[in-house]
Image: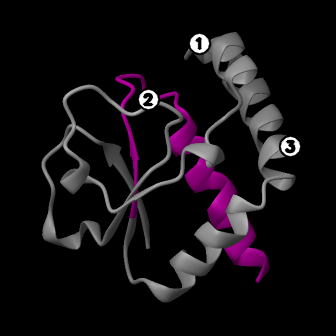
Amino acid sequence: MIKIKRVYDPMEKDDGVRVLVDRLWPRNVKKSAVDLWLKDIAPSDELREWFNHDPTKWEEFKKRYFEELNKNPKVRSLLELLKKEVNVTLLYASKSPYNNAVALKEYLEKLLEKE
């Protein structure tokens, strides 16, 4: 099961493997709060800066991000982790509900449906 939550939210037993999917390490977060940091799976700096959590750009952001993910070899590693683990929680720092972890969860779920 893929879950998403802010990295600042309290850890829970059912989080499973906690994977930070942001390019930058969040302020005041201890390394022990994260099991794996996949910064290379985050959107490119150019895409992230263009999007800037603007809800009016959400659909176009997802389209562009999914195109980046289609070329990203780290996706395969994350898929293998998802197949091995019962729970994987994708962690993000943003306060916005329009963020790369939400888009990544959607992308991964579509890929898993196909397999």
Magenta region: 89-115
Say which residue label 1 marks. 52
Q: Position of residue 85 (x, y in %)?
A: 43, 83
Q: Is residue 52 above or below residue 94?
A: above
Q: Is residue 8 above or below residue 58?
A: below
- Quadrant where the C terminus sits is bottom right
First reached walking from the N terminus: tag 2 or tag 3: 3
Q: Say the numbered circle drawn on residue 97.
A: 2
Mark 1 residue element:
loop
Q: Say the numbered circle drawn on residue 67.
A: 3
Q: Amino acid at mark 3?
A: Glu
First reached walking from the N terminus: tag 1 or tag 2: 1
Q: Amino acid at mark 2?
A: Pro
Left/right of residue 50 with respect to residue 98 in the rendered view? right
Q: Amino acid at mark 1?
A: Asn
Q: Position of residue 8 (x, y in %)?
A: 21, 37
- Compare residues 26 and 59 and report the one nearer the observer: 26
Q: Residue at x 39, y 34 (%)?
A: 25
Front position among marks 2 and 3: 3
Q: CA distance from mark 2 to mark 3?
A: 21 Å
Q: Position of residue 11 (x, y in %)?
A: 15, 56
Say whether residue 110 is magenta.
yes
Using a 10 Å C-alpha cutoff, classify the residue at mark 1 as few (fewer than 14 neighbours), some (14 to 19) or many (20 or more). Answer: some
Say whether residue 95 is magenta.
yes
